Amino acid sequence: MRLHTVVGIALFAGGAVGASAQTQTYTETKTEVKPVVITGEVVRYEPGHVIVVRTTDKGEVSYTLMPTVTVPADVRVGRTVSLYTEPGEDGNTLVKRVTTTSITPSGNVKRTTETTRTSPTGESTTETTTTISGTVQAYEPSKSLTITRADGTQVTYMINEQSQLPAGIAIGRRVTIYPSTVTSGSDQMVQRVIYTTTKTKSKTKHGQTETKTKTETHHN
């Protein structure tokens, strides 16, 4: 009788081990899809449907406009645009944002983006954002910021208490300025300034070199 009891316990223990051995753990990894930016000249544009641009490396390529994308009003054939794209489910490349590039009368490179927002009441508003990029030539904190434009000329923006500037602005750094809609006499005012930094790390393992690049945007 005692023998049967021992055998019963042994079989039960063996069953527990077998059940434990069959336990599996699954880990789900989510990959963030970052938009690919395509810059080129507009060859054909059908509002709400497609936009065809010509680039130096890919030639003429057609892109599908997402239903929610807001295209700046100045987009037309011959205009230089930047398309923020992502892959679609059917294999097409979808455009989620469009930015135009132009030269202002004063020689600044101006980029315009339009964003449409819908309130809970159903009211839609369109916001137009204009940015100007250049290299810092001179900087007086709380007073002024001077940048060098693409053509080598310079322009100065005044800074007031409403201006938002990040730490780290220095001569030689490339920045993007959001001009204020408010001016002080003939002086142009700064609303906001941002800049980006890129860090690259390389690691060699088993004879292969792996390089990782991290881009960070600095703003106030």
Image (cartoon, rainbow, N blue to C red):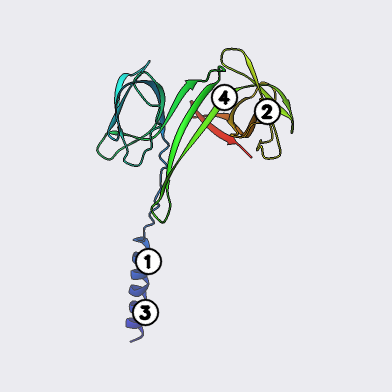
Badge 1 is on which residue? Answer: 17
The residue type indicated by label 2 comes to Gly
Q: Earlier in the sequence, mark 3 or mark 2?
A: 3
Label 2 neighbour load within 10 Å: few <14, some 14-19, many 20+: few
Q: Residue at x 70, y 35 (%)?
A: 160
Q: Quadrant of the C terminus?
A: top right
Badge 3 is on which residue? Answer: 6
Q: Earlier in the sequence, mark 1 or mark 3?
A: 3
Q: Residue furthest front?
A: 185
The residue type indicated by label 1 comes to Val
Assign a secondary structure to mark 4. strand
Q: Earlier in the sequence, mark 4 or mark 1?
A: 1
Distance Cα–Cα, label 1 vs label 3? 17 Å
Distance Cα–Cα, label 4 vs label 3? 83 Å
Q: Earlier in the sequence, mark 4 or mark 3?
A: 3
User: Does the image show residue 121?
Assistant: yes
The residue type indicated by label 3 comes to Val
Badge 2 is on which residue? Answer: 185
The residue type indicated by label 4 comes to Ser
Image location (x, y in percent) of residue 30: 40, 47
Q: Nearer the viewer, mark 3 or mark 2?
A: 2
Report the side of 139 relative to 71 (left or right).
Answer: right
Depth check, front residue: 113 or 55: 113
Badge 4 is on which residue? Answer: 133
Assign a secondary structure to mark 2. loop
Report the side of 163 relative to 18 (left or right).
Answer: right
